[in-house]
Amino acid sequence: MTKITIVANDGTRYELEAENGSTVMENAVRNAVPGIEAECGGACACATCHVYVHEAWKEAVGEPEAMEEDMLDFAYDVRPTSRLSCQIRVSDALDGLIVSVPERQA
Amino acid sequence: MRNVIETDVVIIGAGPVGLFAVFELGLYDLRCHLIDILDRPGGQCAELYPEKPIYDIPAWPEISGAGLTERLMEQIKPFHPEFHFNRMVQSLKKLEDGRFEVETDENEVFHAKIVVIAAGGGSFQPKRPPIPGIEAYEDKSVFYSVRRMEEFRDHDVLIVGGGDSALDWTLNLQPLARSLTLVHRRPEFRAAPDSVNKMFAMQEKGDLNFEIGQVTGLSGADGQIEAATVKGPDGEVEVKATRLLPFFGLTMKLGPIADWGLNLHENLITVDTEKFQTSVPGIFAIGDINWYPGKLKLILSGFHEAALMAHAAKKIAHPEAKVVFQYTTSSTSLQKKLGVK
Ligand SMILES: Cc1cc2nc3c(=O)[nH]c(=O)nc-3n(C[C@H](O)[C@H](O)[C@H](O)COP(=O)(O)OP(=O)(O)OC[C@H]3O[C@@H](n4cnc5c(N)ncnc54)[C@H](O)[C@@H]3O)c2cc1C
Ligand code: FES
C-alpha cells in the first residue's frame, strides 16, 4: 500500500492508502473526495478529474502524454502542475504524493 | 404556414441506442425520423471517444466508438431513416388525436404516433469557459458557435481554443474581421495539422495574432465586450476584442427534457422494464437517459431496451395488426425488409 494525500478545495486532507497500479482518480472516487467528478470513468475523455500535483512531486509524477495534454485544454484554470488524476498511476515511487483539487472541474 | 413532418416514430437522439432503435422499429415497418443537436450520428461514441476501443459489444472483441457508429449506420440503412442534425428538440406534447407533436429550435414540427427518447446523458452543449462574468456577454458579443458569418464582419474577433472548431473559424473569419486573435493554452494544437500550418502562415504575414495563454477576464459594458485579459507565460496582455468565440468542447446537459411532464428519477426518465415506456403511454425512453431498478448505462443494455420497446410500440402504432415474434435468420418477410436477396 502506498500513501497518497488528496487535498480538497476546502482544505480537507484525504490521506488514503492506495493500491499500486490503481489511479489517483479511482482512489479519490472510492473515498468520495469532493470535486473529482471523473465523468468518463478514467478514459481520459472528460477532463473532470483535474488535479494540481504539489511542486515537490511534479518530477516524480512526470509529464502528461499528448492525449492527456489535449484533454487538459478543456479543464478549468490549467497550471504547469496540472494533471488528470485518472492518468496518474500509484506506485512505490509516489509514496507520500500530494495533489490538490481545483476550485471546480470544467 | 407551419410545415409539419408526419411519421410513425420520432427518435430524440442519434446515439448508438437511437440508431439501433431504427433497426428494431424497422422490422415492424415503423418509419423513423431522428433528431440530434450534434452534426453527425453516434452520440457519446462519436463525440467523446471516437478512437477509443470498446470491449463489451457482443461478438465484437474490440471496436472503436467511430467504428460502432459506422456499423450501426450500415445496419439500419435498409430502413431509410431520416436524420435532422444540428437541432435541439424543445418541446414534446400530446395532440388531441392521440399522436405527439415534437418541435425543434429550428421551428420544425413533427407529428408522430410514437416518440422514443434516446437522449443519453442529455444534449451536447458548449462548455462555458472559466472566465468570470462571461454570462453577461453571452449571445450579445460572446458566441459559442457561428450561425452567420456576417455577424463577425469588421469586428475585432477573439477566438479561444486549439481544436478544429477554433482553427476552422480562425481561418474562415480572418478575411472578414477587422482584426483576429487566436488564444490557446499551448503551442500544440488538436486541430488538423493543415489548418494549424495555415494559421501560422497567416500569423507570419501579420494577418492575425496568436497568443499563448488563457483568457482570465473581460471588460466592456451592456453585454458588449471591448477587451480581454490574456494571461500567458510572460504575464498578462490586453487584447482588443468586440466578439469572443470560445471553443472549449461540449458537455452533456439534460436540457428541455425535464419540462415534458414525464416522471423523473434524479434527472433520468423512469420507465418500466417490460416496454421501456415512460409515464406517458406512447412515449418510450431507452439507453442512458432512462432509469429503472438495476439499470446499467451500457450500450448493450440500450440495445436490449430497443428491442422490447419496438415490440410494444408496434402494438400502439398499429393496434389492429397482429404482432408476431420472428427471427431475422428464418423469416422471409423480415429478410425482405432488410433487402436480403
Ligand atoms: C469515455 C467513455 C467510454 C465508454 N465506454 C463504454 C464501453 O466500453 N461500453 C459501453 O457499453 N458503454 C460505454 N460508454 C457508455 C456509452 O457510450 C453510453 O452508454 C452510450 O453512448 C449511450 O447511448 P445513447 O444512445 O443512450 O445516448 P448518447 O450516446 O448519449 O446519445 C444521445 C444523443 O441524444 C442527443 N440529444 C439529447 N437531448 C437532445 C435534445 N433535446 N435534442 C436533440 N438531441 C438531443 C445528444 O446530443 C446525443 O447525441 C462509455 C462512455 C464514455 C463517455
Ligand atoms: S476521468 Fe475523465 S479524464 Fe480522467
Image (cartoon, rainbow, N blue to C red):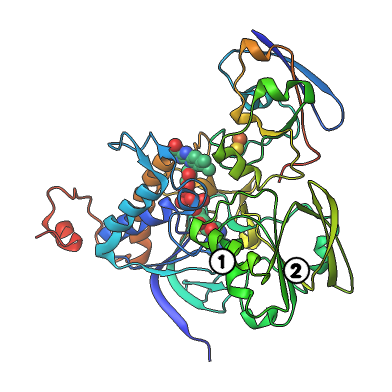
In the displayed orientation, state which residue is furthest to the front: B205
* Residue hosting label 1: B168
Disc number for residue B134: none
Does the image show residue B204?
yes
Q: Nearer the viewer, mark 1 or mark 2?
A: 1
Position of B92 with respect to B248 (left or right) is left
Position of B287 with respect to B79 (left or right) is right
Question: Which is more toward the observer, B35 or B93?
Answer: B35
For disc 2, the neighbor class at 10 Å (few under 14, some 14 to 19, many from 20) is many
Mark 1 touches mark 2? (CB < 8 Å)? no
* Residue hosting label 2: B142
Question: Which is more toward the observer, B31 or B255?
Answer: B255
Residue A8 screen position, x and y as percent: 80, 29
Does the image show residue B272?
no
Image quadrant assignment for residue B21: bottom left
Q: CA distance from mark 1 to mark 2?
A: 18 Å
In the displayed orientation, state which residue is furthest to the bottom: B1
**Residue A100 vertical position relative to residue B90 in the rendered view, above or below:** above
Q: Secondary structure at mark 2?
A: loop
Residue B6 screen position, x and y as percent: 41, 78
Amino acid at pointer 1: Asp
In which quadrant of the rendered image does the C terminus of chain B lie? bottom left
| Residue sitting at x 40%, y 50% | B66
Q: Secondary structure at mark 1?
A: helix
Q: Earlier in the sequence, mark 1 or mark 2?
A: 2
In the displayed orientation, state which residue is furthest to the top: A1
| Residue sitting at x 38%, y 34% | B56
In the image, are marks 1 and 2 on the same chain? yes
Say which chain tag 1 marks.
B
Residue B113 screen position, x and y as percent: 42, 69
Residue B273 screen position, x and y as percent: 45, 43
